[in-house]
Image (cartoon, grey):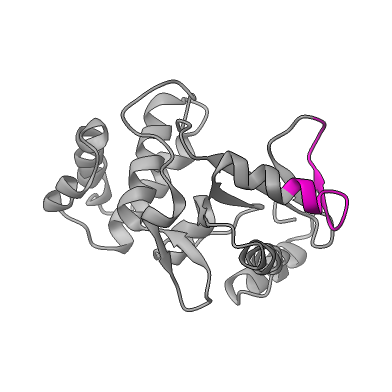
Amino acid sequence: MYDVCMATPISEVARRADLFFMNRSPIHEAMQRLHRTLSEMDIRYAVAGAMAANAHGHRRTTADVDILIRPEDLQRFKDRWIGRGWVDKFEGSKNFRDAVCEVDIDDLLTGGYPGDGLEKPVRFPEPESVSQIHDDGIPYIDLPTLLNLKLASGMTASHRPRDLDDAIQLIRGNQLDERYSQELNEFVRAKYLELLEASQVDEDF
């Protein structure tokens, strides 16, 4: 796992980060293992969250893998594989855990809403409509969708400020400008423009 606690020696933290940025971490292994299994079952999905942010140029570590998936496809996967290398995080949870790599898999279900979970103009879309296949063969949600979800989540869930920081770093990393707001859902455009301005502030102080 890549969550850092006070008892973890700094040398171990550095080693884990090195493995992560070389794409050799347990997180990457879990993502590849899940990709092979879902592909064999012909289940459409797309990687979201921090791993998608990495694919779009915002390099940061994470402790889990988020996937966008249809509820019925998630159930089909669970019916076949829970107890056989994957386990539910707890009874009744939609999320599960790779018991081989010891990595949590968090599921974003199509039709649901990011952030506070309440109805809003931004919702989790069909995975194949927003996915891009990268060099590693894995489908990731595209940049406009990632920004829509990060912005909507950060705007409506005060306990998720990291989503807004991710949006700022994605803006910086992809050198986005005011025109890019037209690629986004109207619901998040004002917040995008606000963070665009924030992203242009010199980080050196």
User: 205 or 200: which is nearer to us?
Assistant: 200
**Quarter of the figure that contains the N terminus:** bottom right
Taking the image as drawn, is residue 139 in sight?
yes
Whether residue 203 is visible, yes or no, is no
**Which is nearer the eye, 188 or 85?**
85
Residue 131 locus on image (x, y percent): 41, 59
Residue 68 x %, y %:
52, 48
Residue shown at the point (77%, 65%) measured from the top left: 12
Question: How many callouts does the rendering have?
Answer: 0
| Residue 160 coordinates in the image, percent (x, y) | 50, 33
Residue at 37%, 29% (x, y): give it: 155
Q: Is residue 203 left or right of residue 18?
A: left
Query: Which contiguous range is marked in magenta?
Result: 78-91
Q: Quadrant of residue 16?
A: bottom right
Q: Residue furthest left?
A: 179
Is residue 95 left or right of 101 when viewed as pictured? Answer: left
Q: Is residue 81 left or right of residue 43?
A: right
Q: Is residue 34 above or below residue 22?
A: above
